[in-house]
Amino acid sequence: MSSPSAATGTTPQSTTRGAPEGPAARVSRLFLPLIAVCTAVTAANIYLAAPLLPLIAHDFGSTPSAVAWLASVAQLGYAAGLLFFAPLGDSVNRRRLVGVLALVAAAALVAGAASAGTGALAAAVLVASAATVVPQLLVPLVAERAPADRRARHVAAVVAGLFTGVVAARVLGGLAGQAFGWRSVFVGAAVLTAVLGLATAYVLPVERPRRRGPLFAGLAALPGVVRHSPDLWRACVRQAGMYGAWSALWTSLALLLAGDDGYGMTTAAAGLFGLFGLAASVVAPLAGGLVDRFGAAKVVRSAYLVAAVSVPLFWLGGQVMAALCAAAVLVHAALVASHVANQTL
């Protein structure tokens, strides 16, 4: 039997314009912005150590080049987290998984701040980076909830948050490290990760697991999924190439900018260089609109052309700062655009 409001075409008082907004409505309105901010904070953890390498080396009585491998440890941990933890989003409660991973990452960052040597710090960075797969659990959820004609734009909002966090880790990390020390940066990141991770877990919808069986059954199924999905493996290959080029830049850039045989900048000044990458993050909303209009393949091809232009500029950037700045903007814009396209696909 239909309700009186349905029969008369009127709406209940709780949903009329100007009526007080209920808790569910407020949570729904906060869903996408909170996920974008959480993505920014958690993604920043992977790159937290990179701008702090000169400070870490000084604290441990070493040289920046001798501790540069810590940045690679972070990448290794992130790759392991993607392999082992991201597939769990299909088989466990995603709300609980996001909360647990946020707390694990926060605890590892605190342990890193208290470390007395590079070995203990490397172990902490490895664990923190492995637990930093929260964005990869959230992007599919955003894509599922978004209207089909605006899916890429919703994904773009999360991707913009991700890369904003990556760049902010370098800019704010360098400034805060110069002012308060690298250990304080790790503690601050731990607090933000725990607070925003738990807040995001709270607003996530309650879901029923899609996959039954052993906990890591999704890991065993990955080869078959890739083999039977041409779009998936093509997206993997495309983004692997783009991410490799981008990561090669940012992993070594701090040494070029702050090293005695480079530009000799302070840690804070070198961190400010990340603002060029932040400027490129505005490409994400534009890329989302282009993917919705023209498709992912065309956007990816355009992104690769932009990245190709940046290569000779990077080569020149070892001697000319302006070329290095231009190259940083271009390669970051290319990565963001291709990431939005491949995630949407």
Image: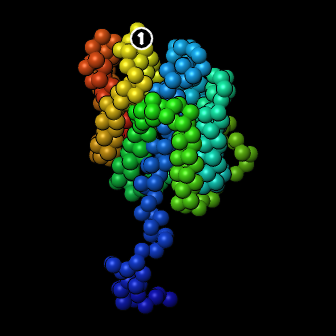
Question: Looking at the picture, which amino acid does disc 1 mark?
Answer: Asp
Is residue 66 shown above or below 181? above
Which residue occupies the extreme right position in the image? 214
Q: Residue furthest left?
A: 322
Horizontally, residue 132 falls left or right of residue 269, namely right
Depth check: give the residue in front, 156 or 73: 73
How are the colours assigned in the image?
A: rainbow
Q: Nearer the viewer, residue 335 or 64?
A: 64
Q: Is residue 21 visible?
A: yes
Residue 321 position, x and y percent, is 28, 17
Q: Is residue 163 left or right of residue 203?
A: left
Q: Identify which residue is drawn at 41% across, 84% down.
A: 12
Question: Which residue is rendered at x = 53% and y = 54% of the image?
Answer: 200
Considering only vertical position in the picture, is 87 above or below 267?
below
* Residue 18 quadrant: bottom left
Q: Tell me what residue is drawn at x 42 percent, y 33 percent.
A: 175
Residue 313 visible at all: no
What residue appears at the point 45 percent right and 43 percent down from the top-left corner? 40
Give the x, y percent position of residue 107: 65, 41
Please state which of residues 295 and 268 is positioned toward the viewer in this rendering.
268
Whole-percent x, y for residue 254 in the image? 43, 21
Q: Which residue is mark 1?
A: 260
Quadrant housing residue 96 = bottom right
